[in-house]
Image: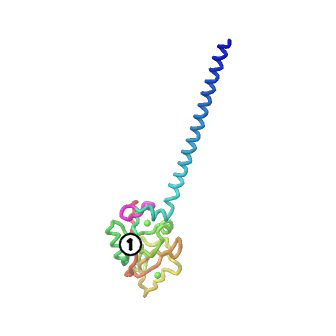
Amino acid sequence: MNFFKIIISTADRHTCHEQLRDSLKLYRCVAVSFGLLCILQVALNISLRLPLSESYLFTSHRSHNGWLYFSHSFYYISQIKKTWPDSRNDCLQRGADLVIINSREEQVLLVQNLMWIGLSKRDGIWEWVDGTRLAQSFWCSGEPNNHKRGNEDCVQIHSCHPDHGWNDEECRHSSLWICEKNMAL
Ligand SMILES: [Ca+2]
Ligand SMILES: [Ca+2]
């Protein structure tokens, strides 16, 4: 009888050890899964927030040959100053054109120093470089003022305000400029 008791007791211990081992495996599995979920959450947060950050765009999104990418467009910001017609020629030679600002998001993204944009006056009407007439505008307060002898027929983006800012200026004035290559075309 004692012999059978020993066998049963040994079997119970084995069962108990197996249950304990299974429990440990389960806890380990839960802990690893939780850790992976945390890593995934951090990665998602970073990927969703960073593209919306201007500073990230202009410091970390510099792509080949100085072109920056944002929302289906590549942008090139010049390092030297030229007149509006010469700036436009430079963009055309790069397979692009002076930037057309289609939305407040694009305006906020690009507003920095004084830089030519693809807006000029033709026959007294503001027109983008693709021939479309100006609809949504982001003029600085008091602009366009056609200040210099009535010859301010070209437009610069200007950081007079965090989310808006354009100034009309003489086209022969030298300024930095922004080219845009729209990938949706
Ligand atoms: Ca655009
Ligand atoms: Ca002006």
Q: Looking at this rendering, what residue extends furthest in the bottom direction?
A: 149
- Residue at the spot x=55%, y=46% of the render? 37
Callout 1: 10 Å neighbours few (<14), some, many (20+)?
few
Q: Looking at this rendering, what residue extends furthest in the top direction?
A: 1
Q: Which residue is mark 1?
A: 79
- Name the quadrant containing residue 77: bottom left
66 is within the stretch colored magenta: yes
Q: Nearer the viewer, residue 160 or 17?
A: 17
Start and end of the magenta stretch? 63-72
Q: Nearer the viewer, residue 49 or 91?
A: 49
Above or below residue 35? Residue 80 is below
On the picture, is 145 further left or further right than 82? right
Q: Secondary structure at mark 1?
A: loop
| Residue 1 appears in the picture as rendered | yes
| Residue 134 placement (x, y as % from top left) | 45, 72
**Disc 1 residue type (three-letter):** Gln
| Residue 133 placement (x, y as % from top left) | 43, 72
- Residue at the spot x=37%, y=69% of the render? 97
Colour mode of the rendering: rainbow
| Residue 115 placement (x, y as % from top left) | 43, 74
Quadrant placement of the C terminus: bottom left
- Name the quadrant containing residue 149: bottom left
| Residue 127 appears in the picture as rendered | no
On the picture, is 175 further left or further right than 20? left
Count of marks overlaid on the render: 1
On the picture, is 92 further left or further right than 144? left
Tell whether circle 1 marks a residue whose Cβ is less than 8 angstroms from ligand 1.
no
37 is within the stretch colored magenta: no
Q: Nearer the viewer, residue 104 or 59?
A: 59
Quadrant placement of the N terminus: top right
Q: Looking at this rendering, what residue extends furthest in the left direction?
A: 93
Q: Nearer the viewer, residue 6 or 40?
A: 6
